[in-house]
Image (spheres, grey):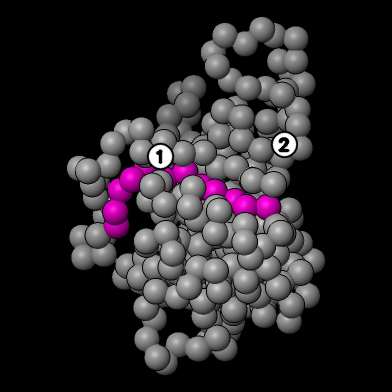
Amino acid sequence: MFPLYLLTWWDDNYMFLSLHNLLSCLIVQVHLDYLEAGADIIITASYQATIQGFEARGFSRGESEALLRKSVEIACEARKMYYDRCIEFACDDREDGRILKHRPILVAASVGSYGAYLADGSEYSGIYGDEITVETLKDFHRRRVQILADAGADLIAFETVPNKLEAQAYAELLEEENIKIPAWFSFNSKDGVHVVSGDSLLECVSIAESCKKVVSVGINCTPPRFIHGLILSIKKVTTKPILIYPNSGESYDPEQKEWVVLSSITRNQCLGKLFLSF
């Protein structure tokens, strides 16, 4: 099935460039854009990438695992390129707004929820059905987490965790597989009190607090109006740094499979910034 090829023109010669490599270059550029805007952490393009999903599209197990590793390699490559640019332009006075400053930069390997793999909107409802257990979720994520942890990332970002069940599965998996790099858990809340499944956010955060492998816990994909209250609540049950993602204010429509802008959300409400609150 891959590689696929695009025909391009360069210096009167035909050159074949695999679509896979082209997309890799585009992702590298996205990472560079974030770094040049001042980001200290870049997150791999692996949120919805799963071995099961790749295999369903016709890739072999080996190809699927290689694609997961590639997501980390791309981010690490972008970091190296950024550091090279910092050296190259060290003496230049920047007038284009780019930030070229050598600083510690972390690569976080993104792990999306089981619902993200299903692509049916359940990552925003947290409803997986009674047949899905902690063991089911551990088996689903296990090899993926192993690969990402060994691929060269600095930490693992478990993102948009929609329910207590999956938080428990992640925590147990980190311990069972003795994952060597730290992790963060980021939940999504529907009302400022519960995660989207209806489970208590504080109970979910307590799972992260009890796991020594987890170094930070926080919120993403959540309406901005809830964030301040959520930070105050989370601080009551964790001593770990609190992580907050930006949110542009849209709502996901699982039937149309697209993001819908809410007319009641103002531009100022949509502004956000990823930060760690110590």
- The residue carrying pointer 2 sits among few (fewer than 14), some (14 to 19) or many (20 or more) residues within 10 Å by Cα, namely some
Q: Nearer the viewer, residue 172 or 44?
A: 172
Residue 265, position as x, y percentages in the image: 27, 42
Q: Position of residue 51 (x, y in %)?
A: 53, 72
Q: Is residue 1 left or right of residue 157?
A: left
Q: In the rendered view, would you say 140 is above or below 183?
A: below
Cα–Cα gap, marks 1 and 2: 29 Å
Q: Is residue 111 visible?
A: yes
Mark 2, secondary structure of its residue? helix
Residue 147 magenta-drawn?
no
Is 233 or 17 nearer to us in this picture? 233
Q: Amino acid at mark 1?
A: Leu
The residue at 57%/39% (across/down) is 31
Q: Residue at x 67, y 80 (%)?
A: 172
- Residue designated by label 1: 7
The residue under label 2 is 80
Which residues lie in the magenta part?
A: 241-252
Q: Nearer the viewer, residue 9 or 212?
A: 212
In the shown orientation, is residue 21 left or right of residue 108? left
